[in-house]
Image (cartoon, rainbow, N blue to C red):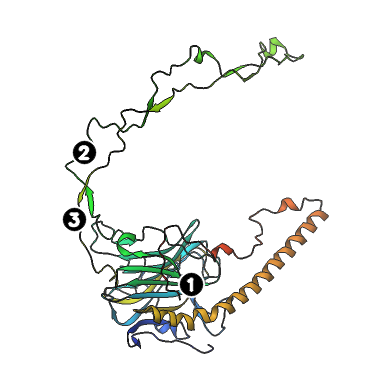
Amino acid sequence: MAGRGLLTVGMLAATASATVYFKENFDDKWETRWVVPSKWKSAEEMGKWVLTAGDWFGDANDKGIKTTEDARFYGLSAKLAKPFSNEGKDLVLQFTVKHEQRLDCGGAYIKLLGPKLDQASFGGDSPYQIMFGPDICGSTQRTHVIFNYPQVKSEEKNLLIKQDVPTRTDQLSHLYTLHLIAANNSFNVLIDGESVRAGALEGAWDFLPPKTIPDPAQSKPADWVDEAMIVDPSDIKPAGWDDIPATVPDAEAVQPEDWDEEEDGAWEAPMVDNPEYMGTWTPRMIDNPAYKGVWEHPQVPNPDYFEDPKLHARAKEVTAVGFELWQVKSGTMFDDIILTDSLDEAKAYAKDTFWAKKEGEKAMFDAAEAVRVEKEKAEREEMMKNAKVNGEDGESMFSGSDIEISEMDEDDEDEDDEDGEITFSDEL
């Protein structure tokens, strides 16, 4: 793959039935195609992008763009050759992400942007049509899938998927794919070719009002009994129950010989738990013979409900793709972007890019990790040795936050699908 360079940016006829609208794998002329917003944030707040193969890679000549400054905003956008809409056809948005810094807080998502885009002012408040990709901050770790839906009744038109989509948090490249399927208004999110969330669009986002609503003409009857348990009227608190104290003077305690009542006052034995104390009395509960169950409000058709046979058409005159990010700790890389109407076309592109580099990158990373772990072990042993020479407790010098010696998290690679998840058979 050496010297492969830019594959394509723009409008290409990939096959007789597939169209590629945007493709970018970042060569040394990438800055002529991408615009950094100059009117979004001040220059001091904006982080610098660099073209690099990264610290570990499968091909030294195959490069991507990387964030390089901590606690900075990052913005970029690139135009399509012509506007793209996906009404009546599939949409596949795919790109690779690598968090070389082991990201602790920051975004790594891409946006599809509409005809009103001002590239110089593009930022967090700019309108977008689709936002897709990983977002990590502390315990919040998800792959964002957000669609703009102007028809929604609420003021917020950018709708987040209702069930979080998992993401990957290790330091290797991962392939993120969003597939919108026109034939049945469904979706599929894949990471490294494996489905992590899929199903009907209508149920996974709050696009439409509910089909039914509680009947406003009906309410729970006044005599409806919905208490399943009641106090047993025959259960009476035993006489003297509240007279038993929780603590009593210690019968075995003896006044100290040096106790001076004039100086110390009258001596009193310390209090101890009373073994006869039975706690606060509560009456026994029994089944309520009058219980009718939980009242269910009768449902009626919602007059505000409407059908939308074009839910899949989330791209309406898309003119550009863009990144607008905040990263506390920089070091995230992006590469191999494709926007097409064919999953097969995205698969073919992934085969030539992501999959061609994956094994080599993993081998280089593993070798670097082995060196790092051995170096940190040696440093720890040397510090402990010096501590003992100085009469210090070597072990107490270290805590979990001092030196981290750990292998890459295996569970990042093998996250289990959640129960009830619908999966598709398509794999990249």
Give the left or right position of residue 358, taking residue 163 as reference: right
Q: Quadrant of residue 276?
A: top right
Helix, strand or loop at mark 2: loop
Residue occupied by mark 3: 304
Question: For the residues carrying marks 1 and 2, which lies nearer the camera in this image?
Answer: 2
Residue occupied by mark 2: 219
Say if mark 2 contacts mark 3, CB within 8 Å. Answer: no
Please name whichever residue, 45 or 422, is drawn nearer the observer in this view of the structure. 422
Marks 1/2: CA distance?
Answer: 51 Å
Please name whichever residue, 355 or 30, is drawn nearer the observer in this view of the structure. 355
Q: Quadrant of residue 125?
A: bottom left
Amino acid type at circle 1 is: Asp
Q: Earlier in the sequence, mark 2 or mark 3?
A: 2
Marks 3/1: CA distance?
Answer: 40 Å
Q: Earlier in the sequence, mark 3 or mark 1?
A: 1
Q: In the image, is residue 128 above or below residue 388?
A: below
Give the left or right position of residue 339, taking residue 332 as reference: left
Question: Residue placed farthest to the bottom in the image?
Answer: 3
